[in-house]
Amino acid sequence: MASGWMQTRQTKYAAYATIYIIVILAVLVVANFLANRYNKSYDATANKRFSLSDQTKKVVGDLKQDVTIQYFDRSTGMQNAKDLLDRYTTLSPKIHVQYVDLLKNPTLARAANVSREGEAIVDVGARHEDAKTFDEEGVTGALIRALKGGERQVCVITGHGEHRLDDSSQSAGFSGFQTIVERNNYKVQAINLLQKAVVPDSCSVLVVAGPSGDYIQTEVDAIKKYVEAGGRALFLLDPPLKLGQHQVGDNKALSDLLENWGVTADKDLLLDESAASQLLGGGPTAPVIMQYDSHPIVNDLTNVSTAFPLSRSLETKNTDKTTISKLFSTSADSFATEKLDSAEIRIDPAKDKRGPFTLAVAGTFTSGKPADQGRFVVVGNSAWASNEALGFSGNRSLLLNTINWLSSDEDLIAIRPKEPEDRRINLTRAQFRMVQSTSQFFLPLIVIIGGVMVWLKRR
């Protein structure tokens, strides 16, 4: 009896174990099937570093034709590439990725003109574009160039103390401007209208980059003719400060042109005492913008801040041929002072005008031909696009959104790929010693004392 009962009990246990194993295997099979078919992941990083940007999602999601991305590297470097390129393939079935081992297929690498490891090439039909850097910005930039059929040209005027493209200094340099714009499907070059007062036909966007000197009338006439014939221009105008060696001209001829188009650049300096400017470190002379009006340039900047050191206000009105739209303004806690020759700038609530003040506008010029509509953007500040401020929060995205809108590439306007966030903690010498003492001495000592007390108690 006992033997039969034991056999019956063992049989039940065996049956239960078998069922459990079958269920576990079934769950694993289903989980693997779903994982292979639906590639989902969760990015827990603070700035979503491992998620593709809205711009990339927009470009890839709207694909109407097949795209092939070839990645060339040694076999040991393929996995890092897969981590990035797999995110592209999950966005659209039109994306196809090929991994080419340089050691096993050297002839294919030579045929593609690949000269280094870790290089990616994007093919769209007969067009081939090399990713300038192997990251999201580089790959998406190559994809945009291949889809758009080559680079467009951004022309930056020189000759009157404007920010220089070859200046890599941390303050007034515009080398970062050139680097960022060129990574996004544009070629940047400097032009001088003093040598030839004609804007080249190759210019997709003309940039007036914070001149400190006055433009002569022939230069302004060339800009006027260019925009009113359907050209696109970005005007970055600083307040006419008169501080020691830092002198900014009134630029009357250029100001008169903009006023004829409905934009008046006031001769003032904006001071913002809002909490946003103070908390983000801008100070009163560097207004921080947190809210934006409705326009394609700024619609995607919700909850993104931008900063504008040393700015002037703008006044706007529509004319018979221009339509002006405000992009953003300073806060209600801002003031405009006309004391532009004093080294010590203080707010005088009794005399200074109180905000908000318009800081940037976008306009269109109707030439009578729908295909030849001119576009222009005016910002009462140029430092926001310099090396010093371009890395601030949304300044970079604002710049590229502006260039995209001016060149009629509205479909590319979005928040750009994020830079890796620096999460390091900087400690003073005293703080480091405190952390070191706590981790190396106090915590081990507490563990030892606790152990001794438990041992004595049990004994």
Image (cartoon, rainbow, N blue to C red):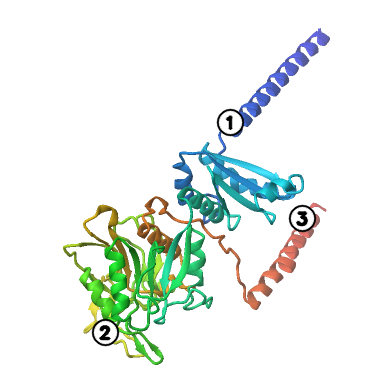
In whole angstroms, how far apart are the C-alphas of marks 1 and 2? 66 Å
The x, y position of residue 425, in whole percent, is 60, 68
Which is nearer the N-term, disc 1 or disc 2? 1
Farthest-out residue, bottom: 244
Residue 116 is marked as none
> Which residue reaches farthest front?
196
Q: Earlier in the sequence, mark 3 or mark 2?
A: 2
Residue located beneath label 1 in the image: 34
In 3D space, how far apart are the residues under numbered discs 1 and 3 (Cα atoms)? 51 Å
The spot of residue 286 in percent (x, y) is 38, 75
Q: Is residue 14 left or right of residue 391?
A: right
Where does residue 136 sit, x and y in percent of width and height?
A: 55, 53
Picture quarter containing residue 290? bottom left
Check disc 1 and give the amino acid type. Answer: Leu
Where residue 111 appears, as percent x and y from the top left, is 67, 48
Query: In what element is the residue under mark 2?
Result: loop
Q: Which is closer to the viewer, label 1 or label 3?
A: 1
Nearer-the-camera pick, 193 or 357 = 193
Q: Who's the residue at 38% across and 69% down the image?
A: 207
Q: Of callouts 1 and 3, which one flags the residue occurring earlier in the amino acid sequence? A: 1
**Residue marked by disc 3:** 454
Please name which of the two marks, 3 or 2, marks the residue nearer to the observer: 2
Q: Identify residue for label 2.
A: 338
Secondary structure at numbered mark 1: helix
Residue closer to the observer: 105 or 278: 105
Can residue 41 be seen from the camera position used here? no
- Count of numbered marks: 3
Vertical order, 212 against 130 (above or below): below
Query: Badge 2 local density, few (<14 within 10 Å), some, or many (20+)?
Result: some
